[in-house]
Amino acid sequence: MDRRKFLTFVGGAGALAAMNANQKADALEQAMGQELEENQLGRLRKSAICRAYGADDSWDRGTANNAKYLHMGEDPRLPKMSEKPTLLEFFDKRIGHSSHLLQSARLAKLNGLPEKIVLACLLHDISVIAYIAGDHGYYGAALVAPYVDEEVSWAIKYHQSLRFIPDEDVGYPYPEAYIRYFGEDYKPEPYIYKDAEYARNHKWYMTARQICINDVYSFDPNVTVKLEDFHDIIGRNWRDPEEGLGFDGSPSAHMWRTMIYPNNSL
Ligand SMILES: [Fe+2]
Ligand SMILES: [Fe+2]
């Protein structure tokens, strides 16, 4: 790192001269850590996994003997969930009444789309909000697949790739917001193009595309959308399992349990 910057960090040449070799090495390490936080990498929003486990190796995993407390069971910092949680309970206690999801579903409804597409819009970013952001279409689809019509989970999966591929003919230009978020030169990875191409030729293409079209990037702050407005659509198009989400042994039960107990040590 820059010597002048380091001298400022330690409080000047006099302070540095008074340090022994160990102290100098420690100070350099601290200064470099601070520099990392200050540079662009440090300002990047971290994913849930990075926040939990440390993107910079600073998180100490600890050892069996260091007497660190590892959390298990109900987390007192989170609202306790019932023994048989439903989707609506997850909205109340884990997902939150997300404006983004509600506004997207509202738009789909205003556009006169079928109920299952409205539901797909209501759930399309469930993973970003309550599970994980990376590959959120795939995770979101996996989460909901056992409880919705196959077309709904298929569309949630493929909205992830299609949103990067404009289709002006159906009213979907490349989102201007993505230029701001990811830069002008951003090119998605090859698997995104491959999956978008596959989706483009699928019979449910327009279902996934409708999620993108109704995926609002800026919305009217004066409009308040309530989850209650969609209770009837959820009731007709979502199957809550008898045992409760997380406890029915479905292929995504473990994912719902992770949301119930997100801080469990194991
Ligand atoms: Fe999305
Ligand atoms: Fe979205």
Image (cartoon, rainbow, N blue to C red):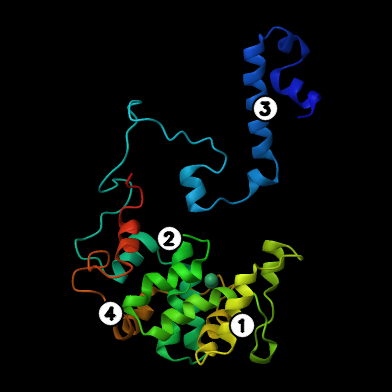
Q: CB of mark 3 within 8 Å of CB of mark 1? A: no
Q: Nearer the viewer, mark 4 or mark 1?
A: 1
Identify the mark nearer the N-term, 2 or 1. Answer: 2
Query: Which residue bears the numbered disc 4?
Result: 239
Q: CA distance from mark 2 to mark 4?
A: 20 Å
Q: Nearer the viewer, residue 59 or 94?
A: 59
Q: Tag 4, which secondary structure?
A: loop
Structural crowding at the residue carrying mark 4, measured as other residues with C-alpha within 10 Å and reported as few (<14), some (14–19) or many (≥20): some
**Disc on the earlier residue, 2 or 3:** 3
Q: Which residue is mark 1?
A: 197
Image location of residue 68, percent across then percent down: 35, 30
Tell me if residue 202 can be seen: yes
Amino acid under label 1? Glu
User: Which of disc 4 and disc 3 is earlier in sequence?
Assistant: 3
Does 232 appear above or below 39? below
Task: Say what amino acid the circle numbered 2 marks.
Answer: Tyr
Please name the amino acid that badge 4 sits on.
Arg
> Residue 77 placed where, x, y %?
33, 46
Quadrant location of the N terminus in the rendered image: top right
